[in-house]
Image: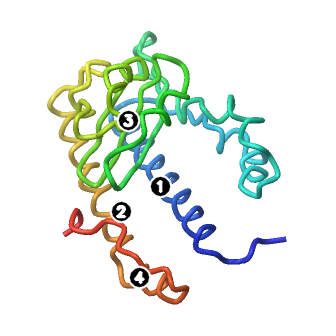
Amino acid sequence: MPKKWSVRNAERNYNVAKGRIGEALVEQLFSSLGWDVYPVGFESQLPVLAQLKARGELTPGAISRFENGPDFIIHMRNAAERVHSIEVKFRNSGMINASELQKYWPDNLLFILMDPQGISCLQRSELDDYAKSAKVVFRKCPPLAEHPAFAFGPDEAEIIRAFQFIAKAFFCKLETSEMFRNAYKARGACRDAFGSVCS
């Protein structure tokens, strides 16, 4: 039986949708950069368990090991040794609790961090550098185009910049659109999620 509408449920569903959109953008980005991209995330490989969790029929601890793995395995075409596991995180605030990232595995996992201003990259093993602050600020992390794990050249950097514009345009227009505002006004929960960052 479906749950009744509530602000909490609506925002959770909306944030899940934004996360999936962010994953789709990153998947297409790496494909455009010449990588093969294989979804291995919890939601894509174990959708039944994901649905049970969303309905509150599974406790978070029961499936945490499955949830805290990467979203994708990526492999550079024609380069057998170039394989990475990546986890995508989108936050309109441009920051995330360090503790939220520390639960992920393996240590060589690469976080692709997206906000309206750009795309950054941080390796799981580099989190100790942020231990003194509770928050990881995306803009203080290396830009994806400059991260040493990839050694991207000028052409790849240009592709990444193009996807940054796509991501910013999409998320900003989505959350500041009249349709979005009116949908939330109708339920008494209108808010401007991005504020001046999308102006």
Q: CA distance from mark 4 to mark 1?
A: 19 Å
Residue type highlighted by circle 2: Phe
Instruction: Tell me where residue 190 appears, x and y as whole percent.
Output: 44, 80
First reached walking from the N terminus: tag 3 or tag 1: 1
First reached walking from the N terminus: tag 4 or tag 1: 1
Q: Is residue 43 left or right of residue 107?
A: right
Tell which of 111 and 93 is nearer to you.
93
Tell which of 188 and 162 is nearer to you.
188
Q: CA distance from mark 4 to mark 3?
A: 32 Å
- Residue sitting at x 61%, y 37%: 41
Circles 3 and 2 in contact, beta carbons < 8 Å:
no
Locate residue 173: give its quadrant: bottom left
Which residue is the site of mark 2?
171
Q: CA distance from mark 3 to mark 2?
A: 26 Å
Q: Which mark is residue 21?
A: 1
Circles 3 and 1 in contact, beta carbons < 8 Å:
no
How packed mark 1 is, by other alpha carbons closer than 10 Å (few <14, some 14-19, many 20 or more), is: some
Instruction: Tell me where residue 87 appears, x and y as whole percent.
Output: 48, 34
Secondary structure beneath label 2: helix
Residue closest to the far right:
1
Secondary structure beneath label 1: helix
First reached walking from the N terminus: tag 4 or tag 3: 3
The answer to whether 167 is drawn above or below residue 3 in the figure is above
First reached walking from the N terminus: tag 4 or tag 2: 2
Which residue is the site of mark 3?
134
How packed mark 2 is, by other alpha carbons closer than 10 Å (few <14, some 14-19, many 20 or more), is: some
The answer to whether 197 is drawn above or below residue 135 in the figure is below
Secondary structure beneath label 4: helix
